[in-house]
Amino acid sequence: MLAKALSGLQVYEDPNVLIGFDRADDGGVYRLDDQRALVQTVDFFTPIVDDPFIYGQITAANSLSDIYAMGGTPRFALSIVGFPDQHLGEEVLHEILRGGTEKMNEAQVPVIGGHSVQDKEIKFGYCVTGLVDPARIYSNTGVRAGDALLLTKPLGTGIIATGIKFDKAPAAVSATAIDWMSQLNAPALEQLQKFPVHSVTDVTGFGLLGHAWEMATASGVTLVFQAADIPVMEGAEELARQGMLPGGIESNRRYVGSGVAWNSATEFHQQIMLDPQTSGGLLISLPEKEAEGLSAQLEARGLLGQRIGTVVSLQDTHIQVTS
């Protein structure tokens, strides 16, 4: 929605803007000098879990993720709050902020201020600023034919969050999804920075295929995914069978449109690859010969490093899904 609204606007041109809103990247980048650039992003959303503390944690992890996806180190954050203070007690807001602050503390990121407004429903998030080496920015334009594709978190948070909303998700399924959503992507970034990675994006609201489509179109290549290799959170498939499907799945299907060749992919594989994620993992594109080494490094540290596809020269569509 915002991208369409911004299209055609004449913005001030500054040669130090290395990445702006026209690139569909995870954050904006502004060069300070030859060794340093600022990377900034903002994200907020309504609650996806009932516990305000956990909601605050997930929101903080999600807000930090774009900085990691650009290859940056977050330095400070500003909070953004919309809150119906006439209907909910101050203790609810306190718990949201406490959860967010604890996650920011884990990431060693100070929260230095913020802004709040009265709203009909709760909204919470952060504007995060980080630093990145201008020569090592992970942009959507860097994907190359011959690369392998790795994913660092399983999919399914949108479906499971819908199950939580309608009280259909078993406690164990909810707990596992919450653990994944609360996990910072910083440890994964630490490992992938040891390899000649070409491109990274974090998988969030547009789902795996929406963000993959942005990478593929920006780089002029085709991403080929093996549906059977896509990691899925426990319980997501059963909840999908029960109809616990977020509206974002069909929105994301419209977003990628004819840019995907589904071939023989099952309906569930289509749903899970379009499922809007919250605080999802990193989708990494790197040379084929380096993929096994990075995957092993991630797995050795208790992280996921699942190989899910390859990159080829541009075909009839930017995304192809095989069974």
Image (cartoon, rainbow, N blue to C red):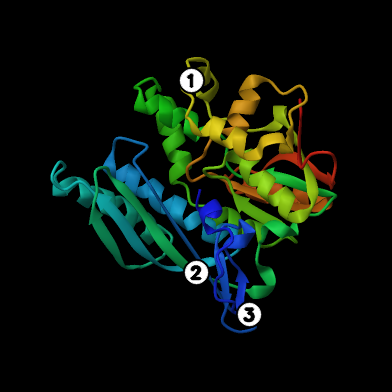
Q: Tell me the kind of residue under disc 2.
A: Gly
Measuring from the top left, give residue 221's x and y in whole percent.
Answer: 80, 49
Taking 87 as reference, is 245 left or right? Answer: right
Q: Residue at x 69, y 51 (%)?
A: 215
Location of mark 3 (residue): 15
Give the structural element (helix, strand or loop) at label 3. Answer: loop
Measuring from the top left, give residue 296's x and y in whole percent.
Answer: 70, 47
Structural crowding at the residue carrying mark 2, measured as other residues with C-alpha within 10 Å and reported as few (<14), some (14–19) or many (≥20): many
Q: Residue at x 52, y 37 (%)?
A: 276
Give the alpha-carbon distance from disc 2 to disc 3, as whole Å.
19 Å
Q: Tell me the kind of residue under disc 3.
A: Pro
Location of mark 1 (residue): 239
Residue reaching furthest to the bottom? 33
146 shown above or below 128: above
Q: Nearer the viewer, residue 40 or 253?
A: 253
Q: Which mark is residue 130?
A: 2
Give the structural element (helix, strand or loop) at label 1. Answer: helix
Q: Nearer the viewer, residue 296 or 149?
A: 149
Q: Quadrant of residue 193?
A: bottom right
Measuring from the top left, give residue 298's x and y in whole percent.
Answer: 64, 49
Give the alpha-carbon distance from disc 3 to disc 1, as whole Å.
49 Å
Q: Tell me the kind of residue under disc 1.
A: Leu
